[in-house]
Structures are given as structure tokens and as C-alpha cells.
Amino acid sequence: MDENKKMEVVFAPGCFDDFQGTPEELAELIAEIHKMADSGEIFENARPLSEEEAAEFLAKQTQTRQ
């Protein structure tokens, strides 16, 4: 990735539908995600999904789109 290019963070529609916190807590969470993306910390703490996690994620995505 180009060091000078800022990463764009895009959230899928409905991705926070099950969020259990207040609107203020959600705003703080989103701000923290953007901060981590800007600093590169989001990549430093990332890990690959296991095959089971990937299958579960894809199954949920398919259900959401139906």
C-alpha cells in the first residue's frame, strides 16, 4: 500500500444494527476504528480468519443480502 495514501474505511449498511450501546458509544467506536486505520494500528493488530470464521462470515453476508 502506498505510504502516502490514506486508507478509506467504509462500513456496510446495517453493520451496526446489532450494536448494544448508546449512539455516543457507537460514535466513539467508529472514531476509534478510523484512528486505528489512520495510524496503521489496525493492520498491526490484524490476524487472518480461520477457515471456520471465514465460512461463518460469508454465511452471514449471504443471509444479510437476502
Image: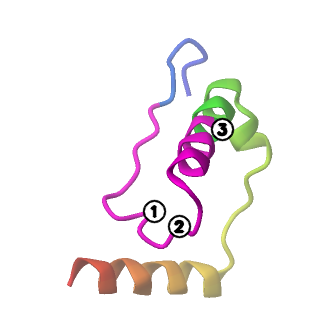
22 lies left or right of 17: right
Mark carried by residue 19: 2
Q: What is the x, y in percent for residue 30? A: 55, 43
Spatial CA span between label 2 and label 3: 15 Å
Foreground label between 2 and 3: 2
Residue 22, image quadrant? bottom right
Colour scheme employed for the rendering of this structure:
rainbow
Residue 1, image quadrant? top right
Q: Secondary structure at mark 1?
A: loop
> Which span is picked out in magenta?
8-31
Could you tell me how many numbered marks the image carries? 3
Of callouts 2 and 3, which one flags the residue occurring earlier in the amino acid sequence? 2
Of callouts 3 and 1, which one flags the residue occurring earlier in the amino acid sequence? 1
**Would you place residue 22 above or below residue 40 in this image?**
below
- Give the class, few, some or many, for how many residues have Cα within 10 Å of label 1's Cα (few <14, many ≥20): few
Q: Amino acid at mark 3?
A: Glu
10 lies left or right of 35: left
Mark carried by residue 16: 1
- Residue picked out by circle 3: 32
Q: Amino acid at mark 2?
A: Phe
Residue at 35 percent of width and 57 percent of height: 12
Q: Is residue 58 magenta?
A: no
**Would you place residue 3 above or below residue 16 in this image?**
above
9 lies left or right of 3: left
Q: What is the x, y in percent for residue 21? A: 59, 62
- Give the class, few, some or many, for how many residues have Cα within 10 Å of label 3's Cα (few <14, many ≥20): few
Do callouts 1 and 2 mark residues in contact (Cβ within 8 Å)? yes
